[in-house]
Amino acid sequence: MLCACALVLGGCMNTTRTRFTTHYTLGEPAPAIASARHGQKVLRISRISVPPWLEGTTMHYRLDYRHDNRLAAYGRSDWIAPPATMLEDLIRNTIAAGDNWRAVIGAGSTATADADLHLQLENFSQVFAQPDQSAGLIEATATLVDDGDGSVMAQKHFRVEIAAPTPDAQGGAKALGEASRQFATQLERWLGTAVENQSVRMNQRSQP
């Protein structure tokens, strides 16, 4: 029974050969669509904040079918960089490919921005509903802040879950890679709506 479980989550260890750690990425980003660049404002994407358990490169999974809410970690597989670091690049490139902003800059830029996007990553793990059935799950809260007066322009909680093709680390990496791309796309669309709504409110206030 124990060996069967180990096979599902990564394979029984063969002591006759050396085992190396496999490093995973989020995969290739979706092709960028040409933009007419209608936006006039500059967006700064702040560093993604994470809970302590997501600060490193560990690949986490949870056995939901056991109903114990405990996180576990793959012993011979990890991420090539912390999840937040990989997400920051993907999100910045996805938003920059859209047409809502004149420019998208990172947290380290000294350029002046009109708005700041703050992201709180709350979950980035593989969740097993059954021993042979799992999904990549991302949960995060996005807050768009006016850089001029510090007021909150909009806020939204995101939850993206993608089925894993295989019940192992490789399948989890593929599922979380696709979940990351979908999250970045949903975030880009939400920002467009938030900016549009903010413009409408400002126009209404300026009318006599």
Image: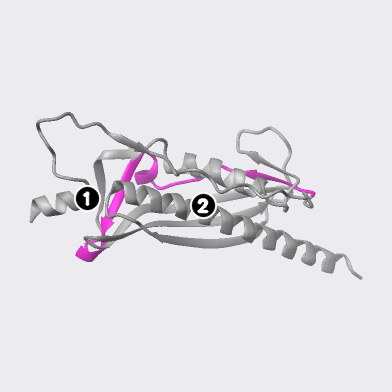
Q: Residue at x 74, y 38 (%)?
A: 112
Q: Residue at x 53, y 45 (%)?
A: 29
- Judge whether residue 63 can be spotted in this image: yes
Q: Is residue 90 above or below residue 21?
A: below
Identify the secondary structure beneath mark 2: helix
Image position of 112 (left or right of 138): right
Residue 107: percent from left, percent from top: 60, 38
Dot 1 alpha-carbon crowd within 10 angstroms: few under 14, some 14 to 19, many 20 or more: many
Q: Is residue 16 above or below residue 198?
A: above
Q: Which residues are magenta?
A: 40-68
- Picture quarter with the C terminus: bottom right
Image position of 161 (left or right of 185): left
Dot 2 or dot 1: first in sequence order is 1
Residue position marked by numbered label 2 in the rendering: 181
- Picture quarter with the N terminus: bottom left
Residue position marked by numbered label 1 in the rendering: 9
Q: Residue at x 31, y 48 (%)?
A: 60
Residue 57: percent from left, percent from top: 36, 38
